Image: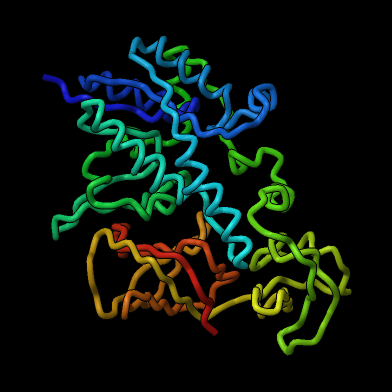
């Protein structure tokens, strides 16, 4: 009897081809899309699209019909609001820069979706992510970074659990994007040339500050830009509008490039510095999720501190549920709230956590 797999379909080309490959491999395939949009006008959703949009449902449904697989729309609206949107806005009010895709992957696309899939009798869930799942010598599941694939998405999945990885299939993990589009075109799928989503799906106009201001989760209060010595340089419009490493959009001219060094909620200040001062010697991280290994006193590793960050060599230690990372070469814009994800030199993911402090 064929194993049953429910494919999380986003209305994009990657999940479309993932569903096709699994069917070709003999799985009993079901397609499902997660309804996560909130109370936007349907026309606006249709225009903006993305993986949250109403248009994505139509695209995914058309693919399922073409592949001749069952298709469902699963309502995860409440979970998405609590675990992703509220987290996103609350982190900015705390002076941190959140990563909503990491939260969505762990708590919605895996935790909630997998539970629903198991209840529907599925053996696995599957997605169109470019990420490999391996099993190092110790037998634990671990994502593996693909050094040769610029689309590698392992970083955004660092928070997945062993149970989630055990019940997950990623059929396009070894493929290049160009090949995925080629397969979709050969099949005549409507998603073959659909562009990748670039912005946060629930903020289609990319106006984070405006979205947060209208969220009702807190009050935005203007404050002071200060230098590292505490000298006032000017006024900012509210800490939610800024992130560590930012240069553009400060709203004030200094006669030389200035960057956000830190955001202080205690006195509502944004600390600015010149470019060479925005580099850090290391970081501290919390909420550690162990993957390929469960404990280590000290070891050398590769680290990524943002999705687009080139892996950097470092030394890491874990002590009292907090991880300390020292870069071998200083890294730019260590940003509280973002993920720090660690790999061994073969690409097996060791662990990851949330950055809470940059170290000088």
Q: Can residue 148 be spotted in the picture?
A: no
Q: Residue, x 24% and y 30% (percent of image)?
A: 119
The number of numbered discs placed on residues in the rendered structure image is 0
Q: Is residue 155 above or below residue 37?
A: below
Query: Is 310 displayed left or right of 225 in the figure?
Result: left
Q: Is residue 253 above or below residue 111?
A: below
Colour treatment of the image: rainbow
Location of the N terminus (image quadrant): top left
Q: Is residue 54 above or below residue 124?
A: above
Location of the C terminus (image quadrant): bottom right
Q: Is residue 229 above or below residue 312?
A: below
| Foreground residue among 151 and 64 | 64
Where does residue 192 sit, x and y in percent of width and height?
Answer: 51, 21
Identity of the residue furthest to the bottom in this view: 229
Q: Residue, x 45% and y 76% (percent of image)?
A: 284
Query: Is 250 displayed left or right of 119 in the figure?
Result: right
| Foreground residue among 311 and 140 | 140
Q: Quadrant of residue 159?
A: bottom left
Q: Quadrant of residue 14?
A: top left
Where does residue 263 sit, x and y in percent of width and height?
Answer: 66, 73
Where does residue 107 sit, x and y in percent of width and height?
Answer: 39, 46
Q: Residue, x 71% and y 85% (percent of image)?
A: 228
Query: Is 127 displayed left or right of 244 in the figure?
Result: left
Where does residue 39 sit, x and y in percent of width and height?
Answer: 62, 32
Query: Is 323 displayed left or right of 306 in the figure?
Result: left
Q: Residue, x 27% and y 19% (percent of image)?
A: 23
Q: Can residue 100 be spotted in the picture?
A: yes
């Amino acid at each position: 009897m064929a194993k049953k797999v429910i494919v999380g379909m986003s209305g994009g080309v990657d999940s479309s081809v993932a569903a096709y490959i699994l069917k070709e491999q003999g799985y009993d395939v079901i397609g499902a899309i997660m309804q996560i949009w909130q109370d936007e006008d349907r026309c606006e959703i249709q225009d903006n699209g993305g993986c949250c949009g109403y248009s994505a449902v139509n695209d995914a449904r058309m693919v399922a019909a073409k592949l001749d697989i069952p298709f469902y729309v699963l309502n995860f609206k409440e979970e998405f609001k609590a675990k992703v949107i509220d987290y996103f806005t609350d982190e900015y009010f705390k002076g941190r820069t959140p990563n909503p895709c990491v939260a969505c992957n762990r708590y919605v696309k895996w935790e909630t979706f997998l539970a629903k899939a198991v209840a529907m009798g599925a053996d696995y869930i599957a997605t169109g992510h470019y990420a490999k799942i391996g099993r190092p010598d110790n037998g634990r599941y671990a994502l593996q970074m693909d050094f040769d694939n610029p689309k590698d998405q392992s970083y955004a999945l660092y928070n997945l659990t062993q149970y989630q990885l055990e019940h997950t299939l990623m059929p396009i993990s070894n493929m290049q994007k160009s090949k995925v589009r080629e397969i979709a075109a050969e099949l005549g799928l409507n998603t073959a040339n659909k562009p990748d989503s670039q912005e946060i799906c629930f903020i289609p106009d990319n106006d984070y500050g405006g979205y947060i201001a209208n969220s009702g989760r807190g009050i935005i209060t203007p404050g002071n830009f200060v230098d590292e010595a505490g000298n006032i340089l000017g006024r900012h419009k509210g800490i939610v509008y800024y992130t560590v490493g930012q240069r553009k959009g400060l709203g004030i001219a200094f006669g030389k490039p200035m960057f956000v060094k830190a955001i202080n909620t205690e006195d509502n200040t944004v600390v600015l510095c010149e470019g060479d001062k925005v580099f850090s010697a290391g970081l501290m991280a919390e909420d550690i999720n162990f993957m390929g290994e469960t404990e280590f006193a000290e070891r050398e590793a590769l680290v990524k501190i943002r999705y687009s960050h080139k892996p950097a060599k470092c030394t890491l230690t874990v002590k009292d549920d907090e991880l300390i990372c020292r870069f071998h070469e200083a890294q730019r814009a260590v940003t509280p709230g973002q993920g720090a994800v660690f790999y061994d030199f073969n690409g097996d993911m060791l662990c990851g956590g949330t950055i809470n402090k940059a170290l000088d």
